[in-house]
Image: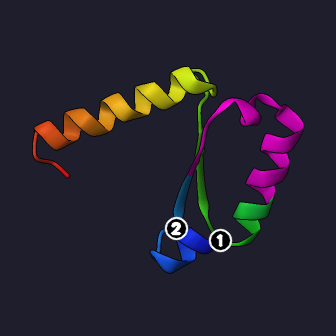
Amino acid sequence: MKLADQTRTNTIVLSGGVFQNRLLLESVIEKLKLEGKTVLSAEKYLLNDGGIALGQTLVARLYIQKKI
């Protein structure tokens, strides 16, 4: 949250194996939304390290296409 505020980011992505814990995921989402943040989390893909690799692939693709 501190990093998001420092960078003026309102969208936060939750990923990684820790967020496979549904109770933790829902609790964090609720807190972030109360702070006015937009929260993205995997619905179709894995939340564990496989999901992180998928996100890294997307960023690399956008970088190569010079969209970021």
Q: How many marks?
A: 2
> Residue 38 at what x, y percent from top left?
58, 59
- Report which quarter residue 33 is drawn in: bottom right
> Residue 2 at what x, y percent from top left?
62, 74
Q: Would you say residue 15 sits in the magenta stretch?
A: yes
Q: Name the side, left or right, on which 20 lies relative to 8.
A: right
Q: Which residue is mark 2?
A: 10
For image coordinates 61% across by 65% down, the residue present is: 37
Q: Would you say residue 2 sits in the magenta stretch?
A: no
Contact? badges 1 and 2 (CB < 8 Å): yes
Q: Amino acid at mark 2?
A: Asn
Q: Which is the main secondary structure of the residues drawn in magenta?
A: helix
Q: Amino acid at mark 1?
A: Gly
- Residue found farthest to the right: 23
For image coordinates 63% across by 34% down, the residue present is: 16
Residue 36 image label: 1
Depth check: 64 or 12 in front?
Answer: 64
For image coordinates 50% across by 31% down, the residue present is: 52
> Residue 10 at what x, y percent from top left?
52, 67
Quick one: SS at disc 1?
A: loop
Magenta residue span: 13-30
Q: Name the side, left or right, on which 56 lies relative to 45.
A: left
Q: How far apart are labels 1 and 2 at the CA level?
A: 7 Å
Display colour scheme: rainbow
Residue 20 image label: none
Q: Name the side, left or right, on which 27 lies relative to 7.
A: right
For image coordinates 70% across by 29% down, the residue present is: 17
Depth check: 21 or 49 in front?
Answer: 49
Q: Give the answer, above or below, for where 31 lies relative to 44.
A: below
